[in-house]
Amino acid sequence: MESWTVLSDNLQTATLGLLYIRNVSSTCHTHVRHVPDYVRQAVPVFLLLTLAEFLFLQTRRSGRSSFADHVVSLAQGLAHLTVSTCAGFVPVWLYAAVWRHWAVFDLPADSAATWWLAAIGVDFCFYWQHRTLHEVNLFWAMHQAHHSSEYFNLSAAQRQPVLQTLVTGWFYLPLAVLGVPPAAWLTHRAFNFIYQFWIHTETVGRLGVLEEVLNTASHHRVHHASNPEYLDRNYGGVLILWDRLFGTFCRERQPPTYGLVHNVDTFSLWPVQLGSYAALLAAARREATWTDTTRRLLYGPGWQPGGPRLGDPTAVPQPDPRRRKHASTARATLILYAFTHFSLVGLVLLAGARLSSPPVAALLLLSATSFTTLLEGTSWAPRLETGRCLAVAVWLLVVVEVKSAVLTVGGMVVFGGSAVLWAMCPNSVWWQTLA
């Protein structure tokens, strides 16, 4: 009963947190060890709202939803959450080291003034972080995974670059020099991330006067569009004021077409996450001079020799909103199977498995990889899924991390049975892709 009370409190806090509504005094932490995992607390709310939005979209004639695309986005989010949990200590250690040795001011961690300074400072630094991820090709090759969905819905908010946590911590170091305590920075970095979840949707219209100050769903639809007039716009996290101040603001006028200028056309996890680096390095090697090779890496993704740093927007073709979106050829039974197993993995996490545990992290990354390759129809996906199910069943049997005996036994039966099914019937008609 107590655990359900805790879960209910966490859900309520996370729901209010979507709008950055927080209790200042209770979120002023004196040490990073005291900072709760706010993002992980918000995951159940993310999933519930994503499911509710999906069901709502199915009632619309326009059909702006794809179940397979939802599952792929959730799998990408699972991989990001896993890597961020395991490697998240790196930017925290870096920030704390700079704060400890070079902070100019000694700002009290339990002060409301420090809380608000951290909130505004984190959002300001996020603007420049986000702008750099778009305007430097070397970083865009990583960040493009977040924009790779051709749909714009709450599941797309969870399609995050797995390596971004290791790169973006540098942008917040000015706050450490200013004296913002590590706990305050870590707290507001999580709050900023959680706020941005709800703005990934077409179901929220314009919000009147709030549009002048806050980043909203309308503003973020512009940001995710591949229309030439919308490229490199609206980088803000919580506040849209930074875009207005630095000349990157654009209002939503014509309906956006989502995705990339050149879409990746795959659901597989690692080609989406890292495939752009192969194309970028190949393009850099083709440049005639070392100067142009450097520019190819450090200028915008649309740059061409002799052109402006961010490329010529008039050279970008208008996307066809009626174009055929990349879709899974998997049967509905396979898509439902992938979603069911994704939900089972989520239950294991809620039951107490530690994401920072190497076996758990390995199994989660393996799961995300397997789900996406199944939906892409990769030839070796059945063998990978057989191994994944077997590995999860063995882990549940050998490693006692999940506190629920029912979930442990039930999981062993389901995952073990699935492994046997895949091993015996890898080419069953239920799994085959459609022509």
Image (tube, grey):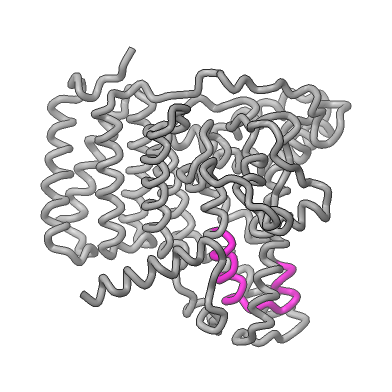
- Asked where in the image residue 165 lies, by quadrant, the reply is bottom right
Above or below residue 101? Residue 87 is above
Task: Find out whether residue 184 is within the magenta segment.
Answer: yes
* In the rendered image, the vertical position of residue 39 relative to residue 286, given as above or below: below
Kindly report the secondary structure that dominates the magenta region of the rendered protein. helix
Q: Residue at left 44%, top 70%?
A: 13
Q: Residue furthest top?
A: 435
Q: Is residue 73 left or right of residue 280?
A: left
Image point (60%, 76%), residue name: 184
- Tell me which corner region of the image, top left, top right, bottom left or bottom right, holds residue 4: bottom left
Q: Position of residue 49 (x, y in %)?
A: 41, 51
The one of 293 and 320 positioned closer to us in this rendering: 320
* 346 relative to 12 in the view: left or right: left
Please provide percent x and percent y for residue 46.
42, 54
373 relative to 30 in the view: left or right: left
Q: Which residues are magenta?
A: 173-193
Q: Residue furthest front?
A: 208
Q: At 35% from the left edge and 29% from the top edge, which residue is drawn?
A: 375
